Image (spheres, rainbow, N blue to C red):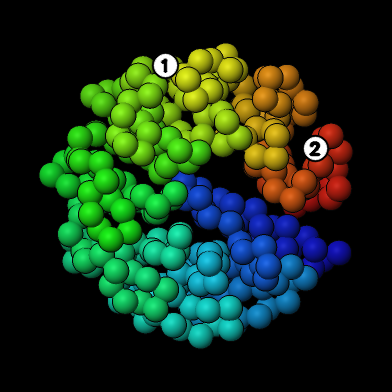
């Protein structure tokens, strides 16, 4: 039981560490970062240490590699803990579609899984590859490149997200809308914030309230919640007045808003949190692991 509680705590830590980055542990051999005596290593699902804590910082595995920091430089290790790409980058992001963005000096570029430079550092900002394209910033504007580094959509946006389900959220002026892979606007800029599509719906914000829209820009779930996460396995976590629960695609509350926070579902389970207490619930809201410190 103690090991299971440790793994649960680590899983939550990983979720928090990965906030803002679409990363989760590889399902075929999941390893989780742990912090012990000021150093980072990895455990498996049973709580067994499989990579001894020796790194100054570590993130979850993606496509068989995990990024780690040694001193002030980032590199990558494999699941045996062997350094396969030496720490040499000022910043790095996890691998996605065979490439990872890295920062060298004051510019961003991309490397492949061998550490070879695939796209030379030349950009002022970058996103990870998704659906074959990546958002990059040049001359104060965002556009999209393909995996050869060629421009697929010319720099013209004030902000840009990853492509998901064929569309990407982009900022034009002070409003967000959506474009397709040809760069054509398919949902006019009208939102104060917008995120990627998941299961046919995307979360967007008007004023200080969040809701969900479909790919035609129609409101699917009204803009009435204070916080929202992407749909995953048919449910999305929402927050109103500091309390979180889950809704289905029709906006029906299926898990009561009674938690301090709810993380997205994965494998039929979601982590819930009340203060420092965390647990797992299933899609009916029943605990499979009770709230535990």
Q: Position of residue 184 (x, y in %)?
A: 31, 29
Picture quadrant where residue 183 is located: top left
The image quadrant of residue 128 is: bottom left
Q: What residue is shown at x 38% (from left), y 28% (from top)? A: 178
Q: Nearer the viewer, residue 277 or 123?
A: 123
At horizontal 61% and vertical 73% (from top left) the residue drawn is 42
171 to the left or right of 225: left
4 is higher (above) or lower (below) than 42: above
Residue 104, compared with residue 125, is above or below; it is below
Q: Is residue 156 visible?
A: yes
Measuring 66% from the left and 80% from the top, which residue is drawn there? Answer: 50
> Could one spot residue 291 in this view of the protein?
no
Q: Mark 2 = which residue?
A: 283
Query: Farthest front residue?
Result: 182
**Which x, y percent locates residue 148?**
28, 61
Q: Is residue 287 left or right of residue 210?
A: right
Q: Mark 1 sits on what residue?
A: 207
Image quadrant where residue 282 sits:
top right
Q: Residues within 10 Å of mark 2 (few under 14, many from 20)?
A: some
Foreground label between 2 and 1: 2
Question: Which residue is rendered at x = 29% and y = 69% of the image?
Answer: 118
**Does dot 1 land on a helix, a strand or a loop?**
loop
């Amino acid at each position: 039981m103690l090991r299971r509680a440790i793994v649960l705590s680590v899983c939550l830590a990983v979720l928090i560490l990965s906030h803002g980055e679409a990363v989760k542990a590889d399902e075929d051999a999941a390893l989780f970062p742990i912090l012990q005596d000021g150093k980072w290593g990895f455990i498996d699902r049973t709580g067994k240490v499989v990579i001894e804590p020796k790194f100054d910082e570590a993130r979850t595995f993606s496509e068989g590699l995990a990024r780690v920091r040694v001193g002030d430089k980032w590199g990558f290790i494999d699941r045996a803990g062997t350094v396969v790409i030496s720490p040499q980058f000022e910043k790095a992001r996890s691998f996605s579609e065979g490439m990872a963005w890295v920062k060298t000096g004051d510019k961003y570029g991309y490397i492949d899984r061998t550490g070879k430079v695939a796209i030379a550092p030349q950009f002022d900002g970058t996103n990870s590859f998704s659906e074959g394209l990546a958002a990059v910033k040049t001359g104060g504007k965002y556009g999209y490149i393909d995996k050869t580094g060629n421009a697929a959509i010319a720099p013209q946006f004030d902000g840009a997200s990853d492509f998901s389900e064929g569309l990407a959220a982009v900022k034009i002026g002070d409003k967000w809308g959506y474009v397709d892979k040809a760069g054509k606007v398919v949902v006019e800029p009208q939102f104060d914030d917008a995120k990627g599509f998941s299961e046919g719906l995307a979360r967007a914000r008007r004023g200080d309230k969040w809701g969900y829209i479909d790919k035609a820009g129609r409101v699917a779930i009204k803009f009435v919640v204070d916080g929202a996460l992407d749909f995953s396995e048919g449910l999305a976590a929402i927050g109103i007045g500091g309390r979180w629960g889950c809704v289905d695609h029709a906006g029906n509350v299926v898990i009561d808003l009674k938690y301090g926070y709810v993380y997205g579902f994965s494998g039929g389970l979601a982590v819930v949190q009340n203060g420092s207490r965390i647990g797992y619930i299933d899609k009916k809201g029943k605990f499979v692991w009770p709230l535990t410190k």
